[in-house]
Every structure is written in structure tokens, then in C-alpha cells.
Amino acid sequence: MATNFLVHEKIWFDKFKYDDAERKFYEQMNGPVAGSSRQENGASVILRDIARARENIQKSLAGLKAVLLGLPEALGLAAPGASSGPGASSGPGGDPSELVIRIASLEVENQSLRGVVQDLQQAVSKLEARLSALEKSLPAHRATAPQTQHVSPMRQVEPPARKVATATEDDEDDDIDLFGSDEEGDKEAARLREERLRQYAERKAKKPAPVAKSSILLDVKPWDDETDMAQLEACVRSVQLDGLTWGGSKLMPVGYGIHKLQIQCVVEDDKVGTDLLEEEITKFEEHVQSVDIAAFNKI
């Protein structure tokens, strides 16, 4: 059964034979040596490039070594164990003139910096001398400064009269104590103090005391969604009390089509309380279900 089945199938079992024959034909036509010769030529080119690169690297390393060996000689420093005779060379890659120029510029810069440092040292020494002189003169100034007496702020002292050149008047001035206190002056100061305190108390009593006020935000909730919110707001605003002022209002959604009335009012704390305000609003039982305080702020 299997053999009969394979007889009817269209399968090319000998395809590999035809592929080998085709490959051999093309090799005979083109020649098999061409591919290998190209590979050999490419390999030889790569080897040549590698050899050339190695040669360049060796030359660069040799030049760098010569420059490093000639650097101490160009700076005038003999390497340890090396002779400084006429046969010594500075190296093929070194440039002594450039190094000498750089060293000269560094020496000039060093000299200028030294000059700046010396100027700064001189300025600091001058400042120290002035400071020591001021410290020496300060105790003498403190010793000669006159001592002042405490003067009561309630009394006004007249300026002293002009000094007279005679010796007798100078003695009289020394005996008089301009800053001394007497009993009459103390009594006068106490009387003035009491009078000012009494006037201040009278002015304070006549001044009206500030009225304490509060800003209240109320949430007024209806029974259901069929409640007329305009009529509810009219009922709330119909509450009139001494010290109560109604403000703005708006409708806020609660849920299921129901809205609550949010209304602002200002009350005087001594005249209107929150309990009284809630009691007056909840009297409208047909429209108002409850009243809550959403916000309370002192003004």
C-alpha cells in the first residue's frame, strides 16, 4: 500500500545528483582557482597593513623614548649615572629653545608674584601698627569721658547757662546740682502722670467696643426631589433677626436628582446664635428636612 501511494506522489528524489552536476559544470567553466587566488591576495594585503602598522608603532615608541631621555639634558639636569661631556646629545625629538622660553616666562611670573606678596605684607604690617595705636589711645579716651547721670523721662532739664570766666562763679556752679531731684518736682511729675492716666481712661471708655461677627455657611436639605427649591430659599430668607444678614446662595447636587441649598450669612455673636438660627429655619417643616453648618469663621 505504501509503495503504491509513493508511485502517485510527485517527488524529486534525485535532485542532489543534478545539483552536483551543475556545480561541476560551473567550476569547469570558470575555474576553481579564481576564488582561492582572491582569498590569498586579500590575506597578503592584510598582512602587509599589519606589518606597516607595527613598524610605525615601533618608530613612534623610539622617538618618544629619545625625547624623554633628552628632556633632563635640555633642562640642564644630568641624569643619574649619565655623563655631561661633549658627546651627550639632547635627543632627536627635543626642542631646548622652547623649554628655555617657557622657563624664562615662569621666572618672570614668579618675580611678579613675589612683588605682590611683599606689597600685601607691607599693607598688613601698616594696618597692625594703626590698630595697636588705636588700642593704646582707647583706654585714655575712656578715662577722660564724662560720666552721665540718669534723667527721668518725665522731666525736662534746661540747658546749662554759659560759663563765666571768673573763679567765684565757677565755684558756685560746682555747688549747684543741675540733675538733682527735689520734692516739688516729684510731686508735679506724679500729678501729671495721674492726670494723663485719667484722660486716657476717659477716652477709652467713650470709644465703642468692636462688634464680634461671624460668617456662617449653611446647608439646607429638602425632603425629596419634588421640593420647590425657590420656595425653600424664600422661606429661609424670610427669617429676619436683629444682627442677621443674608448673603449669596447656590444649589449643590446631593444625589438621585436631589439638590441642597447652600446659603451664606453674617451674624453678630452677641445677638444671634447658631441654635436660634437653626430653630427658625427648621420651622418650615413642609420644605426643610435638616440644617447643617458647613463652615463657621470669625470676622
Image (spheres, helix red, strand yellow):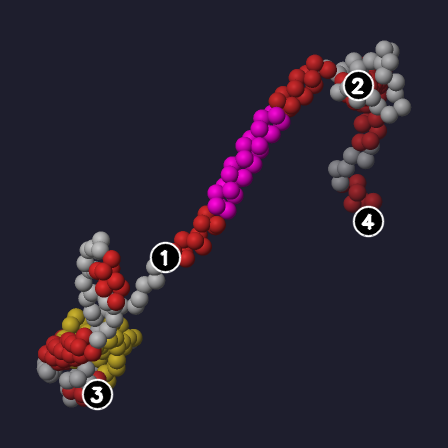
Earlier in the chain: of badge 3 and badge 2, it is 2
Residue 242 visible in this rendered orientation of the protein: yes
Residue 35 to residue 178: above or below: above
Crowd rating for badge 3 (residues with CA inside 10 Å; few <14, some 14–19, many 20+): few
Earlier in the chain: of badge 1 and badge 2, it is 2
Distance from Cα at disc 3 to Cα at disc 2: 106 Å
Q: Is 38 or 129 nearer to us in this picture?
A: 129
Name the secondary structure under disc 2.
Answer: helix
Name the secondary structure under disc 3.
Answer: helix
Earlier in the chain: of badge 3 and badge 4, it is 4
Q: Closer to us: mark 1 or mark 3?
A: 1
The residue under label 3 is 275
Tell me the quarter of the picture where residue 142 sits. bottom left
Residue 259 visible in this rendered orientation of the protein: no
Q: Closer to us: mark 4 or mark 2?
A: 2
Residue at image point 45% right, 55% down? 139
Residue at image point 88% right, 21% down? 82
Q: Position of residue 188 (x, y in %)?
A: 16, 76
The residue under label 2 is 73
Residue at image point 51% right, 38% down? 126
Crowd rating for badge 4 (residues with CA inside 10 Å; few <14, some 14–19, many 20+): few
Instruction: Find out whether the residues at labels 3 and 4 contact each other: C-beta distance under 8 Å.
Output: no
Q: Position of residue 183 (x, y in %)?
A: 20, 78
Q: Amino acid at mark 4?
A: Met
Q: Is 14 or 242 nearer to us in this picture?
A: 242
Q: Amino acid at mark 1?
A: Ala
Quadrant holding the C terminus: bottom left
Label for residue 145? 1
Q: Closer to us: mark 3 or mark 4?
A: 3
Distance from Cα at disc 3 to Cα at disc 4: 107 Å
Q: Which residues are magenta?
A: 109-133
